Amino acid sequence: MTDGYHRFDLIWCDRVVSVAYQAHWLNSNHWHIELRCAERLPVTGTGYRSHFVPCAEDAHEADVRELVESWLNAAAETDAWQTHLEASRQPDLFD
């Protein structure tokens, strides 16, 4: 944690998601959370997402882990993500 961020890896739907977070980012009442993944996630088409979340207390890994998992699970229920999963299962005849 040389840059003020705590880090952990999360396995979500067979994807390794690297999570970095900092409580009270720039002395605010917000957590700054960064997600990095080699594959697309339902919250980002690129595998990277920077997100700010209001917080009343210091962030702990368990809190951030639960928040990220809930966020990914909720986003995975969207029609857009389900369409992406279906399309990724079928080979493209024109590739």
Image (cartoon, grey):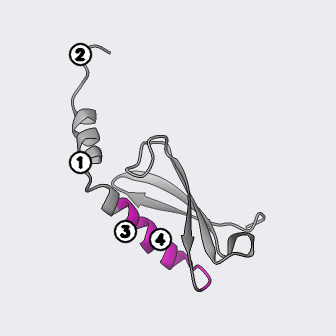
Viewer-nearest of discs 3 and 2: 3
Residue at 30 percent across and 55 percent down: it is 76
- Asked if the residue at tag 3 contacts the one at tag 1, i.e. Cβ–Cβ closer than 8 Å, the answer is no
The answer to whether the residues at label 4 and label 1 have Cβ atoms under 8 Å apart is no
Chain part drawn in magenta: 57-72
Q: Amino acid at mark 3?
A: Ser
Q: Secondary structure at mark 2?
A: loop
Q: Residues within 10 Å of mark 3 (few under 14, many from 20)?
A: few
Mark 4 residue type: Arg
Q: Residue furthest top?
A: 94
Q: Amino acid at mark 2?
A: Leu
Residue linked to disc 3: 70
The residue to which callout 2 is attached is 93
Of tags 2 and 1, the one toward the viewer is: 1
Q: Residue at x 38, y 60 (%)?
A: 72
**Residue located beneath label 4 in the image:** 65
The quarter of the rendered structure image containing the C terminus is top left
- Tell me the mark number nearer the camera, choosing from 4 and 3: 3
